[in-house]
């Protein structure tokens, strides 16, 4: 019974992904809702649909810049919160969780009002500022958990060996925190890339891939958008498999020593 239930849940979860991949090969003309035949043309001419590649490029640009900035700020803040004592530390920790707990529609509308009051024209820059704001919280939580698991005596040993603060940080602290930083960066990239609500409030005339999908859904999502979504899914699966294989190889290498 448990196996049947698990199979039903798995099928339910995979239906949208299978639909996206299958209809990326649809020989559609006006709408990509009804299956009209198999073709590779959509994969060979992925930018044929007007605006889809520009929207995808905007999403990649926003996600990359937001991830780099949020990861740098979040990592520094996580180390400070985990290693140092200062006044209002508890209040600061509470404020960090606020963007994660606040509904996106409230966050997006609030930011849009601030940009309007400040006279800042909406576009790619305002979207990046908004994404950095909510991505920082997720990076801090992820990296802080890693900082808490690292033994401080390892860094003390580096200082006892006359390592400068910069040498200790780049040669000891940063490598030890790398898994947590990478996890926070990947989470930040994923959150930024597929965000729609906050982006819709703050993007103005700029179009991102989620906004393109939302707009196109009224008249039928072009198969080229399915191609991009399918490619992202395949790349994500490949990244997970590579990381799993690398982790297994590392465990095997350590066990053989």
Image (spheres, rainbow, N blue to C red):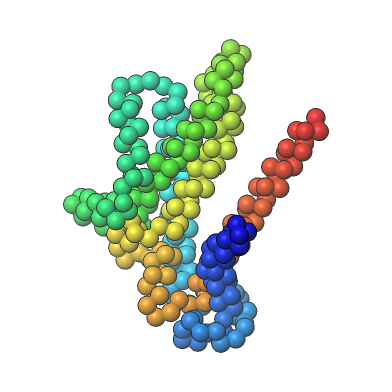
Q: Is residue 23 left or right of residue 118?
A: right
Q: Is residue 88 left or right of residue 65?
A: left
Q: Residue at x 54, y 69 (%)?
A: 15
| Observer-nearest of 150 and 206 | 150
Q: Which residue sits furthest right? A: 256
Q: Is residue 46 visible?
A: no
Q: Residue at x 40, y 57 (%)?
A: 195
On the image, the x and y values in percent for residue 169 come to 54, 26
Q: Which residue sits furthest front? A: 1
Q: Is residue 196 left or right of residue 22?
A: left
- Asked which quadrant contains residue 78, the reply is top left
On the image, the x and y values in percent for residue 26 come to 57, 81
User: For the C terminus, which image quadrant?
Assistant: top right
| Observer-nearest of 179 and 12 | 12
Above or below 195: residue 33: below
Q: Which residue sits furthest left? A: 117
On the image, the x and y values in percent for residue 74 come to 43, 37
Q: Residue at x 49, y 81 (%)?
A: 32
Q: Is residue 184 visible?
A: yes
Above or below 157: residue 113: below
User: For the N terminus, which image quadrant?
Assistant: bottom right
């Amino acid at each position: 019974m448990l196996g049947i239930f698990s199979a039903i849940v798995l099928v339910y979860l995979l239906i949208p992904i299978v639909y996206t991949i299958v209809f990326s090969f649809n020989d559609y003309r006006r709408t990509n809702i009804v299956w009209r035949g198999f073709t590779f043309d959509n994969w060979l001419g992925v930018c044929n649909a007007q605006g889809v590649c520009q929207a995808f490029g905007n999403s990649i640009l926003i996600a990359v810049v937001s991830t780099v900035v949020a990861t740098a700020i979040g990592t520094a803040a996580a180390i400070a919160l985990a290693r140092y004592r200062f006044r209002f530390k508890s209040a600061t920790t509470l404020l960090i969780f606020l963007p994660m707990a606040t509904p996106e529609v409230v966050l997006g509308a609030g930011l849009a009002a601030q940009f309007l009051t400040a006279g800042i024209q909406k576009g790619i820059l305002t979207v990046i500022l908004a994404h950095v704001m909510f991505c920082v919280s997720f990076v801090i939580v992820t990296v802080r958990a890693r900082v808490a698991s690292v033994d401080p005596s390892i860094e003390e040993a580096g200082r006892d060996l006359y390592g400068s603060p910069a040498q200790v940080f780049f040669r000891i602290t940063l490598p030890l925190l790398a898994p947590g930083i990478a996890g926070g960066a990947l989470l930040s990239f994923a959150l930024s890339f597929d965000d729609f609500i906050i982006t819709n409030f703050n993007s103005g005339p700029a179009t991102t891939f989620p906004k393109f999908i939302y707009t196109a859904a009224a008249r039928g999502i072009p198969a080229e958008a399915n191609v991009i979504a399918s490619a992202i899914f395949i790349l994500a699966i490949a990244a997970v498999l590579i990381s799993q294989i690398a982790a297994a190889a590392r465990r095997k290498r350590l066990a053989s020593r």
